[in-house]
Amino acid sequence: MAQETLRTDILISIYPKHVANIVARQKNHEFRKYLIPITVERMWIYETAPISAIRYCAVIDPGRQPGELAEDDLDDINNRKFNDGETLKPGGSGSRYAYKISKLYRLGSDFTLEDLKKRGWIKGAPQKYNFALKEMVLELRPSLIQEF
């Protein structure tokens, strides 16, 4: 029987240097070339190698396109470039959507790729994004500690 997924939560891979900028509050948007479904409220951040673990969960706003970011959001890393359309590339590549990180939580303990696989929550690191399993969210949410 298939495990139940939540359409409100996704697992998404982000490079550790970008996660560090989010935690330091220097980066308040996550940029993607694809639209994440509007039902998604939280991103469980899988930090890529060498961390290879989920350590944070971000509450996000719906995706915005270039020109839609608020004026008071333009000073953080790459926000102005995104808003001015400078992140768009010929052929449709580049960042087309920005997701504002309105809250950030740290897990009480890290969940490594190996931990996640052993529990059957994922088969491998998220490539684009994966909808989170209800079982995972129910287990991890109580351990969240608000960063901002």
Image: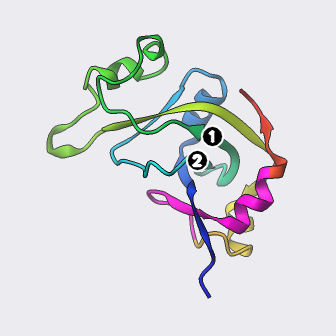
Mark nearer the N terminus (1 vs 2): 2
Label pair 1/2, CB-CB below 8 angstroms: yes
Question: 17 or 91, which is in the foreground?
Answer: 91
At label 1, counting other C-alpha atoms closer than 10 Å, the crowd grade (few under 14, some 14-19, many 20 or more) is many
At label 2, counting other C-alpha atoms closer than 10 Å, the crowd grade (few under 14, some 14-19, many 20 or more) is many
Which of the 4 image quadrants contains residue 114? bottom right
Q: Is residue 128 magenta?
A: yes
Q: Is residue 5 left or right of residue 84?
A: right
Q: What residue lies at 71% left-to-right and 59% top-to-bottom?
A: 137
Q: Secondary structure at mark 2?
A: strand
Is residue 95 at all visible to an observer of this figure? Answer: no
Q: What residue lies at 75% left-to-right and 66% top-to-bottom?
A: 115
Numbered circles on residues, count: 2
Residue 43: numbered disc = 2
User: What residue did someone put label 1 on?
Assistant: 58
The amino acid on which the numbered mark 2 sits, given as a three-letter code, is Met
Query: Where's residue 5, x and y in %?
Result: 59, 68
96 is higher (above) or lower (below) than 125:
above
Residue range of the region highlighted in magenta in the rendering: 124-141
